Every structure is written in structure tokens, then in C-alpha cells.
Image: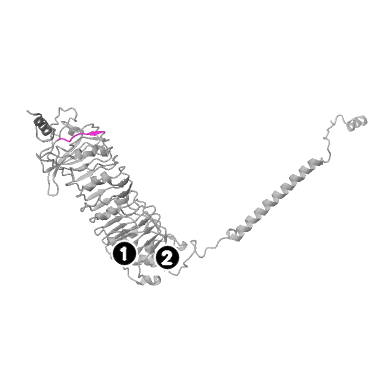
Amino acid sequence: MELRHIVVLFAAWLIVPGWPTGVVSQGQGDDSFEDASDICSRCACSAANASASVLGYDLLDCSRRNLRRMLANWPPEFDADDPDREVVFSLSGNAIGRLQQLPATRNALVFSCRHCQLDQLDGGLFLDAPHVYRVDLSWNRLSGEVLAGGDVFRGQYDGQTLVQLPLDELDLSNNNISRLTADTFRHVTGGLRGLALAHNPLAGELAGETGAALAVLVHLEVLDLSYLALTAIDERVFAGMLSLHELSLQGNQLLTVPAAVYRAPGLVTLNLAENPFVELRIEQALPNLRHLNVSSMPWLGQIAVESFTNVKALRTLLCRSNRALSVFDMAIFSHLPELRKLDLSHSELKHLVPPPGTGNFSNVHRAPARYAEQLETLRLSGNTWHCDCELRAALILFGYDQLPEAIAGGGDDDDDDDNGGGPDEDDEARCETPYMLTSLHLADLPFIDVCDLPANEDHRGTIYEKPAFLRPRAIFLSLLSVGIVIGLGFVIGLAVVCLKRKLNHTGLTGFTSSPVRYTSVRDSTISAAYQQQA
């Protein structure tokens, strides 16, 4: 037999499924794998039959069982050759280090190995599990070099080419990936719809090979690029992702909305929270955007209201915990006819500017709540509100006192997870100033006539008068008196010191210049005379 024939047969022996003693033979006698004959006595095994709503599935939970290797095969109780059943398999919490090839199965597979201290992945990891569609490898030590070449996600050979894995979701967050090679995902480009890369050291600009590795995933629908320390994104990265509808860029170092974002016109949800924006401006159209999160931006002080004409379909705007934001222009509603939820809680807001055309603020209580039917939730708690006629006008126009969620200031909803949860349910929006209205609930402000209060009222109230000793003139005179006393004392002390030195120099420091002499009473002449008389 010629040498080239031997090479071809050897290659087929390595990659073609079903060849004798090939890669599918991971029997119990293989010492490099975990013996699975009694695995259900060490792990949690359960099974469920198919119903009208779900497929039949087998659950094998080996989380935190002190395992060190991959299982050699599936438990005998499982039917690993039924494509109509699903296997949910977890090795999370075991110090495995090196993840070996999974045992063979024709079942649909969901696999998790979180917190496994992984730093190595065998090539062809799912070669014998060709129907894997969800994989979670987060919270490990994987690097870009481990994933290079795409061999980890290599599929089976059909005689002509390698069949792509039908992988639907892949979580690689919280690893040590600092770069990706362009061919990292080449075997899962056909079906991957969800990818998480959050909390990896992909610092700087997302471009080059790393950008190319993502750009080939044209079927992505959900992409998590949060907390990567990104400063810019190449425009070509999202150019082919026409199905991308959820993008998270939270916790990066972006100063503006990246131009690459506008290349994904199908975006429905965009999370830009915790970026160092100074001004929020949306330069180009995002016609399908429904949910926008721009919370926890420490330097955000301005919002370009007119730029919201590019996101007319927006329904939810989360703009909470922005400590540099003191004024919010409610004219934003004139550009967002579909806006239903607005969260402005826990910032430093003092003023709400009513939309144009509000008219005379003093008579605004006679006008109907123009936007009450449009707005469903308005959260204003945790701000330092200055309750004046202008704020009262805005609250009436938006029917703030008629919104249950606005009054509660909290509540649970799906959007609270975008930024670490919403405010406490008992945290209410109240007036901070003026003094007369301090702690007044904003829901009560529409029923109080505040339009006649002095515009520049002192925060302690107009009837407050300082005591005499705190008035500026009294304080000045007190300080002056203290200064004079201290000055006189200093002058007198200096004069005494100088006079003493002068007397020392002339020898007149006392009544005599000779030392004082003392005489004993017993030896004195007076004592002797007294004794003679006696």
C-alpha cells in the first residue's frame, strides 16, 4: 500500500465518526475519563417524559462533586440515542482544569462547566455530541489561544466537509480572553444566535482579528460585550449582523455611541450604561430601537433632545443614577410618541423642563394631563427636587399623581436587571427645596399652588431670621474686639519685656543690688537682750 493511502486512511480514522476504535470509543476502561457506571449515585439524575409543552429530557447534575475529569459515558439510565430527548449536563464547580471530549450522544445537549478552573479545551470537544445547542464555559481561565483555530467547536465529517455544530448559545464571559483569532468561530457561524464575552480583558479598540472573529457571526441576535474596557469599535464588526436585536456595551470606556452600532439597524435593545459619556447624542437612525439604557454615567450632564428623532420607536428609556445630570428636558416626548417608561431615579435632578407649548405655569392646573395616557411609568425618586411652578407644570402634564408605579418609586420589572436592579420600593420622590416644601411628596405637588412663592426664596424660608449674634455685623464686631484685645495684650507684654531688659542692664532690677542675708533668731541681739531681762 502506498504511503499516501496510509496517510488518508489514518486521517479518516481520526475524524470520521463510526470507524472502529475511533474517537467515539471512550469506554469505561479508558483511565483518562471518569468512570460513569455509578455516576447517578454521586450526581443528581432525573428524567422527564415529553409533554405537550416540552420535550422529554434527562438531567445529569454533577455540580460541585469533586470530579476531576470528563465522564467516560452517559449513565445507563439515560437513553443517549434518542434525538427527540434532551440531555442537560452540568459539571460546574469542579476543579477540572482540562475539559475533554464529551461522551457520544444523539440527544439534544445543554452543557455547563462554570467555575471549573478551565485553562485547556480538547479539540473536537463536541465531536460526538453533534446536537449541542447551548454551552456555558463562563468563569474559567480560558484564553484566546485556547480557542484559536476553531477546533474546539469542530463538527463531524460527512465525507466531504465538516458539518457545523448547531450551537445556538455560547457563554465565554469572565475568562482571560484578551484577543480572538479570525477563525475562532468558523465552525459555528451558521447557527450561533447568542454570544456572551462580558468581563474579558479585550481592552482598547474592537478591531483587527478580534473584530473579524465576531463579524462572521452574521446570525447573532444577542451579543454581550459589557465590561471589556473597549474605547472604540470598528464599523465593520456589526455590518453583517442584520438579525442583531440585543446589544450590551455596558461598563466600557466609550465616550459616544459607536458608529458601528448604527450598522445594526435591527437593534431593539441597546445597553450603554456605565460609560463615561459627557453628552448623549444619537447621530443616526435606529428605526427599531425600543429599549435604551443610559444609566450610571458619572459624567453625563447633557442630553441632546433633538437627536431622539432618530429613535422614534423608543418605548423605554432608563436614565437613572446619573449624578452629573441636574436638569431633564421633557421636550423629549415631542420626539418619542411611543415612549411608555421613563426612569430618572437616583440622579441629581433638581428641575424638569416642561415640553414647549405648556403656556402659563400659574394656570397649568386647569389644563388636562396631556401625556398621562401615553406614559405608563415615570420614576423620579432619589433626586434633589426643587419644587417650583415649573416642576408642578411638568408633573401635571404627565399625570404623575395618577401613576401607581410613579408614586411607589419602585416595583419589579424586566428592565431592572439591566443595571443591577431598580430602586427600593419604599424610596419615594420628595421635594428637597424650598424650605417650606421640604419632604413633600411630588405626587402632592400638583394640588399645591406654588407659583406665587418668591422665585429666589432662601432655602430656610422667607420667615426665617438669623439671631443677632449670627448677623454679619455682629460677627465682624466680635472678631474685631477679639483682635484688639489680643493686640493690646501683645503690645503690653512686649513693653514689659523691654523694660525688664533695660533694668537688668542698669542694675535696678530690685530695691538692693546685694543679696539678702538671713540671721537665726537664737543668735540675734534681740534674743540675747530678752534673755538678760528674764
63 left or right, relative to 6: right
496 left or right, relative to 4: right
| Residue type beneath disc 2 | Asp
Q: Residue at x 21, y 39 (%)?
A: 149
Magenta segment includes 96: yes
Number of the front mark, 1 or 2: 1
Q: Which quadrant is home to the N terminus?
A: top left
| Residue type beneath disc 1 | Phe
Residue under label 1: 333
Disc 2 element? loop
**Badge count:** 2
Q: Main secondary structure of the magenta part?
A: loop
Magenta segment includes 401: no
Q: Nearer the viewer, residue 341 or 299?
A: 299
Q: CA distance from mark 1 to mark 2?
A: 21 Å
Query: Where is 62 relative to 494, above or below?
Result: above
Residue under label 2: 388
Identify the magenta region. Answer: 95-103
x%, y% of residue 454?
A: 47, 67
* Quarter of image, res 265: bottom left
x%, y% of residue 161?
A: 12, 41
Q: Nearer the viewer, residue 92 or 30?
A: 30
Q: Residue at x 23, y 48 (%)?
A: 215
